[in-house]
Amino acid sequence: MAGRFITILLLVVFAAVCIGDARMPGAIAQEGTQTTAVDDAYKQAMEKRRAAEPIEDRLAITKAFLDQYPESKYTARSIGAVVYYYGRLDDMPGAVAYTEALRAKISDATIARDVDKEMIVMYGEAGMTDKMIALADGLAAEDALDFGDYWSIIEIGIDSENWKLARDYCGRAEPLANAEAFRANYPDEDFTDEEIEKAGDNRKGMLLVKGGWARANQGEIDEALADFAQADGLVRRSYLDVPEYNLNLYWGKTLMMKGDFRNAGKRFAADALVMGNDDAHDGLRKAYIEVNGGEDGFKAYAVNLHKSIAKPMQSFELPDYNGKRHRYDNLKGNVTLVAFWFPT
């Protein structure tokens, strides 16, 4: 029977609930209603950048704005864009040279601090760990880093396998991993007390996940497993009930280190088969081989395991393009396309 395709658009408004704003610049921040020459110039640059196709053109537009206005409320986010575009062009040395030259022109303490935060990420992505740590340590000593800044450094430490750096900054971020600190970060957001509490717990879980993985790689296997078990009850979970921040992946890999291959496979399963994580799928295959002495039967095993852990979608009712409402339960037996639209 020919499938019926229903496209459902969900307009989803995001609120930042764990690590702050994204590094890639987005909407223009307005301070009051009065615009200035720099506001107009930034708005024009954003419009040109959105219309431009090649990355080189977007980079040139952003640099032209910064060259004209090297010290404004838009400097840090524009630097973030510059670093992003240079990264897309695989030219981090170019990002470093340009940003360091621009930083030398900035005297305003607030703007300089925000640019320095962008430079921490830039140095990390450029593999310039010594410069990154020196800059990060200086800002941390001034209490100038928020949880999102610490988290960026932690992830750089994990990605570069600098386990000491990751654990050090997990410890530094710990005082900000609570409901009170989260509320202080977002004083104007209309979060409920329950949402605030969950966000604080999520931060604690985030640090346990990354800190636990660093511990595992430093040989503290049992301590890492205890961290993961604690994090499992704290971190956010997807609709499919899979914990975020690679918790299951790290947990499975740590169990592999311990030789507990059967339980490792259980930890890899959801990330591998439901979320489509290639690293977890490779871990699941390796765990299966260790338990069964070979790869024979793995594909059938994976299919059956997927069926056993798959979670049926809850019913909902939404309109299609023509305004006709459809209930998900009534679409069983038909091929249905659900398109989730996230406006930016």
Image: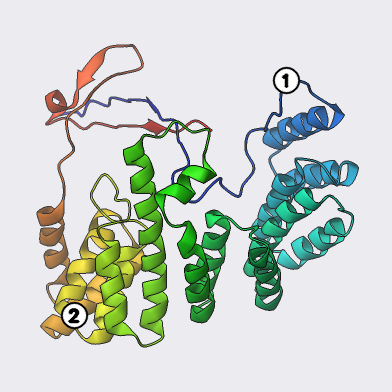
Q: Residue at x 84, y 49 (%)?
A: 108
Q: Amino acid at mark 2?
A: Phe
In the figure, residue 94 lies in which quadrant? bottom right
**Residue 273 sits above or below residue 40 on the image:** below
In the figure, residue 99 lies in which quadrant? bottom right
In the figure, residue 160 lies in which quadrant? bottom right
Q: Earlier in the sequence, mark 1 or mark 2?
A: 1
Quarter holding the N terminus is top left
Q: Nearer the viewer, residue 203 or 246?
A: 203
The label number, if any, that marks residue 33 in the structure image: 1
Left or right: 197 as drawn, with respect to 330: right
**Residue 59 sits above or below residue 90 on the image:** above
Q: Residue at x 51, y 81 (%)?
A: 164
Left or right: 201 as drawn, with respect to 330: right
Residue 144: horizontal and vertical position, in percent?
Answer: 65, 57
Residue 341 shows in this picture: yes
Q: Amino acid at mark 1?
A: Thr
Q: Nearer the viewer, residue 317 or 281?
A: 317
The label number, if any, that marks residue 215 in the structure image: none
The label number, if any, that marks residue 261 in the structure image: 2
Quarter holding the C terminus is top right
**Residue 330 sits above or below residue 128 on the image:** above
Residue 336: horizontal and vertical position, in percent?
Answer: 24, 31
Q: Residue at x 73, y 48 (%)?
A: 76
Q: Secondary structure at mark 1?
A: loop
Q: Residue at x 48, y 70 (%)?
A: 171
Cα–Cα span, label 1 and label 2: 61 Å
Left or right: 21 as drawn, with respect to 136: left
